[in-house]
Amino acid sequence: MTPYKVGILGATGMVGQRLVERLVRHPWFEISALCASERSTGRRYADAARWSLSSDPPPSAAALVLRACRPQELMDCDLVVSGLDAAIALEVERDCAQAGFAVVSNSSAHRKDADVPLLVPEVNAAHLDLIALQKRSTGGGFIVTNPNCSVTGLALALAPLHRAYGVRRTIVATLQALSGAGLEGPRGIDLVDNVLPYIPGEEEKIQDELGKILGRTAGDGIEPAPVQVSAHCHRVGTLDGHLEAVSVELGRDASPEAAAEVLAGFTGDVHGLGLPSAPEHPIVVRSEPDRPQPRLDREAGGGMSVVVGRLRRCPVLTLRMVILSHNTVRGAAGATVLNAELLAARGLIPRRARP
Amino acid sequence: MTPYKVGILGATGMVGQRLVERLVRHPWFEISALCASERSTGRRYADAARWSLSSDPPPSAAALVLRACRPQELMDCDLVVSGLDAAIALEVERDCAQAGFAVVSNSSAHRKDADVPLLVPEVNAAHLDLIALQKRSTGGGFIVTNPNCSVTGLALALAPLHRAYGVRRTIVATLQALSGAGLEGPRGIDLVDNVLPYIPGEEEKIQDELGKILGRTAGDGIEPAPVQVSAHCHRVGTLDGHLEAVSVELGRDASPEAAAEVLAGFTGDVHGLGLPSAPEHPIVVRSEPDRPQPRLDREAGGGMSVVVGRLRRCPVLTLRMVILSHNTVRGAAGATVLNAELLAARGLIPRRARP
Amino acid sequence: MTPYKVGILGATGMVGQRLVERLVRHPWFEISALCASERSTGRRYADAARWSLSSDPPPSAAALVLRACRPQELMDCDLVVSGLDAAIALEVERDCAQAGFAVVSNSSAHRKDADVPLLVPEVNAAHLDLIALQKRSTGGGFIVTNPNCSVTGLALALAPLHRAYGVRRTIVATLQALSGAGLEGPRGIDLVDNVLPYIPGEEEKIQDELGKILGRTAGDGIEPAPVQVSAHCHRVGTLDGHLEAVSVELGRDASPEAAAEVLAGFTGDVHGLGLPSAPEHPIVVRSEPDRPQPRLDREAGGGMSVVVGRLRRCPVLTLRMVILSHNTVRGAAGATVLNAELLAARGLIPRRARP
Amino acid sequence: MTPYKVGILGATGMVGQRLVERLVRHPWFEISALCASERSTGRRYADAARWSLSSDPPPSAAALVLRACRPQELMDCDLVVSGLDAAIALEVERDCAQAGFAVVSNSSAHRKDADVPLLVPEVNAAHLDLIALQKRSTGGGFIVTNPNCSVTGLALALAPLHRAYGVRRTIVATLQALSGAGLEGPRGIDLVDNVLPYIPGEEEKIQDELGKILGRTAGDGIEPAPVQVSAHCHRVGTLDGHLEAVSVELGRDASPEAAAEVLAGFTGDVHGLGLPSAPEHPIVVRSEPDRPQPRLDREAGGGMSVVVGRLRRCPVLTLRMVILSHNTVRGAAGATVLNAELLAARGLIPRRARP
C-alpha cells in the first residue's frame, strides 16, 4: 500500500511530539508536513521543538521545515492529524475539513459537535457513520476526534461493563500526570511536596464526553448514554499515566470476579482489522493488590492498553476499581493515530490528487 | 496548675517524634518518660531516634534515656500517650489501663472496642462517657483513642454537615502523604514518577471508623451513624498532609454556599474550653478554585484545622469537596494531645501518688 | 526605638514574599510600602501576590495596596529593601539612592559596583566604609547589596578558613533548590525523574562574587581576595536549601578536625551587636556522615546559619566538605534584612523628615 | 553460532533484573539458570522477583525456577554473570571460577584483585591479559569485573583525554540515581524535598577504581594511572542516570573545542568487533548549554553511550564538563554483558561439556 501522506498540526507541542514519534516509522502513514504556530514557521523542527521524549527528535522529522497551520500549506497531504490547542484548533480544523481533508484531531474544539465522532475505535466504531453527515456540507472533508486523555481510559474500562450490565452512575477521582498539561504545565515549585486538586476544565470534559462515547447512533446523530458522572481531578508529579479511582453503579449487580472476566475478555469493535496501533488486549486486568501503578504499567500494550486493577465491591455504588492509561499515548497521540488507522482500514481517507 | 507528667510510648517513631515535639513545651504536660522497643531501651533519645522533623530533637528530650514500654516503667507518670504500632499497642495499652493509667492513644488497636471512645473532641466529646464503663473493670485506668489519620479530616468536615443535613453516603479518594507510612514507609524508587494505589488496611479503617465517630451515645455504648462509606486510598509523594476528594449524599439537599456557611461556622463541642491545641477554626473554608493544597495549607491552625475547598454540587450524590488535614498533627499526634487536653480540662486524668 | 519605615520593592516575587514575612513583625522595622510591577499597582497585596510560603500572607501586609517602584512612591519610608530582578533593579535602585534613600538590595544589579558593599555582615562588615564614597555623589542615599544565594553559604563557610589558613582555590558543585528560580522557575515536567545541570549566569556569579566578599578595604575600594573559583551549578527538585560540595585548597595544610574547630568557633564581625536576624552560630558543624541535608538542616539558626558537614581531606586540593544554606533566607531575604539591621545598629539609616 | 548458556547470579535484584532484560533475547547468549538467595530458591522467577522495570518480567524468564548461588547448580551453563552484592559475591564468584567457569561480574568484591581485570572494553580491552594469570591457579575458570556505576561514565569520558593529554587530577561531584541503591534503597520520605549528600563507600570506589581502569599492563599486572581523584557523591530523586560534574587537570593545555573533538571522535578498543551491546558512539558530545539531563539523555546508544556536555575551561584545573551515564545499563548490567560479549568474541569462554 502506498502510505498516506500526513500533515501534523501543532507538531512542536507535547502531543505533537508524540504524533511525530508514532508516525515517523508508521507502516501506513508518512509524515509530509509539520505545522506549528507563526513564531516557529520556517525553522527546522529540531530547532523549534523543545523535544522532551528523549535525546533528540527522529532524524527524518528533525530536518523538516515547519509550516503554518493552514490548509494551503498541506496540499501535499492526504490526511491531517491535529495536536493543536482547542482555541486554535476550532477554526483551523474546520478550514481543513472544508478544504476536503480528513482531519483526525486530539483537540477538544469539535468533540461536542453533533456531527463529529468522538471515537474510541474499540468502543464506538459505529459512530463513524457521522462522517457522512459532515460530508454533506463540506463536500468531502470531515473531522474525527478522540476524547480527553482522562476520559479515554475510563470509557474503555466502562464500555464492556456498560454492554454487560449497564452503567448508571460513576464517581471518578483522577491522579493525572504532568505531560497532560503539556510543555507549559505547572511549575516545579508548585509540585514539590504537593499535589494540585484542580485542573481547569477537566472535570467538565469527563462529565460531558463519557455519555457521548458510550452513546449509540440514532437517526442522524448520537444518543448519549444516560450515565451520571462526577469527576474529581488532581495533578500529581508523575510524568505519564493517568490513574483513576472509580466507583460505578451498574444496572444490575455484578461480582468483581464476573466484571474482571468481562473486562479481560473484551476485544472491542476493531479486533481483527489489523490496525497497527490496536493493542491485542484493549484492557489488561491485574490481580495484585497494589496495581496498576503509573511507572510500571503505563506502557502495557505499547501504551495503548488500559490497565484495570483492584476490582472490588463498592459499599456505596456497585463496584470500584483503579484504572490506568497512558495519557499522551492511549489518551492522545496514540488514540489519534488509531483513529486514522481505522479511517484508512475503512477506506475513508480520500487520496488527494497531486501534481 | 502543676503539669501532668507524661510517658510517651513509641517515642522514636514518626508519630512519637511529633508527640515529643508537641509535648516538650506544653503548658499542661511535662514529658517524664520516653519509651521504645527493646532494641532502643537504655539509649539516649537523641541517639536512638532517627529524628526526621528538623535538625535535632529538642534538647530536653534528647537527653532522656529510653525505657521499655511497660506500666512498671511509667510509675512517675500521670498519663500515658501512645504512638505505638497496633500489634504492640494491643497488649501494652491494656496493661497500662489495667495499671490505672489514663492512656491516650493514636494506635488502631483499641479503636473498635465498644467501651473505648474514638474521640474527635469537636465532634463527639460526649463519647467520653464510655470511660466510666472501662473504669468498672479496671478500677481507674482507661483508654481513649483518636481515629486513623485519613478519617479525622473526613469526620471533622462531615460532622457539621451531618448535624445540619444528615450524611447518608460518601465516596472518598485519598492522596496520602508519606509521613503517614512512618519512618519505614515506601522506598524512594517506588515513588519517583509514580503513585501507589493501595495502602494496606487503610480503606477498611476509613469505612469502619467514620460511623463510630459520628455516632451517638446510646445506653452504655455508641450507636454508629448509618453512613455508607467507600474509600479509595493512594500514597503520593508528599511529606505531610492528606488530601481527600469527597462526594457526599446528604439527607436533604443543600447548596454549596449553604454547606460552606455551615462548615465555616462550625465551632465544635470544645469551643471555649481553652484547650491549647484546639484551633480557633476547626474547619477553614477556602474559595479559590485550586485549594487546599498540601504544602500551602497543611499548617492551617497550627496543623489542627481541617481545610475544605472546592465545595460544589456532585452530579451523582449531593455535594463534593476537597479536604486537607495534616496527617501527623491533626491526624495523629496533635489529635492525641488534644484528647489529653480534653481529659485534663474535664478532670479525668487521675494524679498518681508519687513517693 | 521608633521603628524605621520600610518600603519593599518587588514585594510579590519569591524573595519579596520572604522579605514581607521577615519584616512584618520585625522589632526595628515597619512595612510602610509594598511596591511591584505596573500590572499589580493599585491591587491589594493579597490579591496580586501568588503567596507561596503558606496558606495566606500576613494580614497586615495582605491589605496594603501595591505601589509602583519609584522613589516618589516611597516618601513615607526611611529605608528601601529590594527583591527586584536585576534588569529592573539597575535603574530603580540607583534612583532611590539618588533620592536619598538607604537601599538594601538582594538584586545582582549593583553587586559589582566598586563603591557598593557586597555585604555578609559576619564576614566583611568593614566594607560598609564604601557607603561614604557613594554619599559623595548622591548627597546621602546609598546602596548595599547581599551576594547571590549560592555564594552566601560558600563565603560564610570559607571566611573563617580564609582568615586562619588562606583560601587559594576552590571547586564547588551546587545542588540548588527551586525557590532560587523564583515563582516562574522550571516546569514540573522538566524536573520529574531529572535534574538540570545548568543555571543561567549562576556559575559566573559565584566565581565573581566570592573574591569581593572575602576582599579587604584598601584605599577607597575593596581589593578582592585572590581566590580561584570554579563552580558547577545544578537545579534539583528541592524547595529550599542550596547544598554545595566544596573542595578547597588552603594556603597551608589543615586537618579536618582543626578546620571544624575553626568553623564551629567562628562568631563573625557582628557578634554581640544584638542584630535580631544574626544567628547565634553563623556556622553549625555537623559530624554525622550524611548531613547536612536540605529538608532537615535548612532551618538551622532560623534559616540564617550555614551548616557544614562531611569535613574531610581532599585527595586533590586540601579539604572538602558539604555546605548547606537556606537560599531564600540566608541567601536572600534574611541576608537583606540582616544588612538592614547592621545599618540600623551603626546609625547609617537616615530618618527622613515626614510631614 | 550456538548461544552460550548463561547462569545469572543475583537475578532478583535491580542489576539482576537488568541482566535478565538484556540477556533474554541476546543473539549470543541464552539464559539457562537464574540464581538467588536461599529464601527465593525453588520459587518461580516471576513470583520471587519484585520486577521493577515494567509491567512484568519477560515470559521466558518468568517461568524459570530459581536455583541457589553455587557452582553445582550451574552445570548446564557455559558462563556465569553476577549481579550479586559484594559480601556474597566474594566467595561465590571465586568458587565458580575455581569450578572452571568464566565469571563476568558487576560486583565490587574482586575489582581490586591484582589478577582480575576491571574492564571497560573501549578503554582497556588489553587488561584481559590478566585472565591468563588467573587460569594458572584455577586451571581454567576466571573472573572479569566491570567498575562501579559512577566510575564507568567517568572512566569512559576521561580515557580519550588521558590518551591525548594525560589526566593528572580530577574532582567529581555526582548526582546519582535511586536505582543505583537497588530495590532496598532510601525511603521515599528521606527524598521528598531533599537530597542525600552521602553514599556509603561510593567515593572510595571512584577514587580507587579510576586509576586501575586507565592503567596499563606491565609485566604480570596492571600499573595504575597516576591520577588523583576526589569524589563528592550525592543521591538524588532520579530513577536512572548518574550525572557527574567534573573538573579535570590535564598534562598539557587543551581547549574545550579540541577536547570535544577528541571525545566525539573516540571509538575505543572494541570498535569493529560487532559486539551487540557496544554503542556506535561510546561518547556522545552535546553542545546545548543545559545537557546532558538524566531523563532525556540516559538512553543514548541504548543506554550504553556516555553523554558529555558543557565542556568549558575550569578556572581552577584545566577543563570541566558534565557527564551522564545510565547507571544500571552502562554502569552495571550493560557493562557486564558487554564484557561477556568481548570474552565471547575473543574466544575466551570455555564451552563446557554437557551430558
Image (spheres, coloured by chain):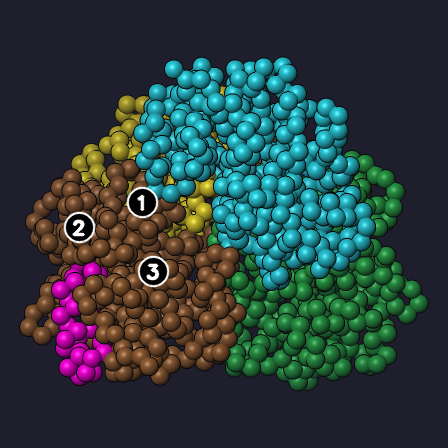
Chain colours: A cyan, B green, C yellow, D brown
The chain carrying label 1 is: D
- The residue beneath circle 3 is D26
Q: CA distance from mark 2 to mark 3?
A: 23 Å
- Label 2 vs 1, first from the N-terminus: 2
Q: Amino acid at mark 3?
A: His
Closer to the camera, B200 or B87?
B200
| Magenta residue check for D219 | no
The residue segment tinted magenta is D115-143
Whole-percent x, y for residue B111 in the image: 75, 68
| Image disc number at residue D292 | 1
Closer to the camera, A258 or C207?
A258
Q: Amino acid at mark 2?
A: Thr
Q: Are marks 2 and 3 in contact (CB under 8 Å)?
A: no
- Label 2 vs 3, first from the N-terminus: 3
Q: Amino acid at mark 1?
A: Pro
3 vs 1, front mark? 3
* Prevalent SS, magenta region: helix
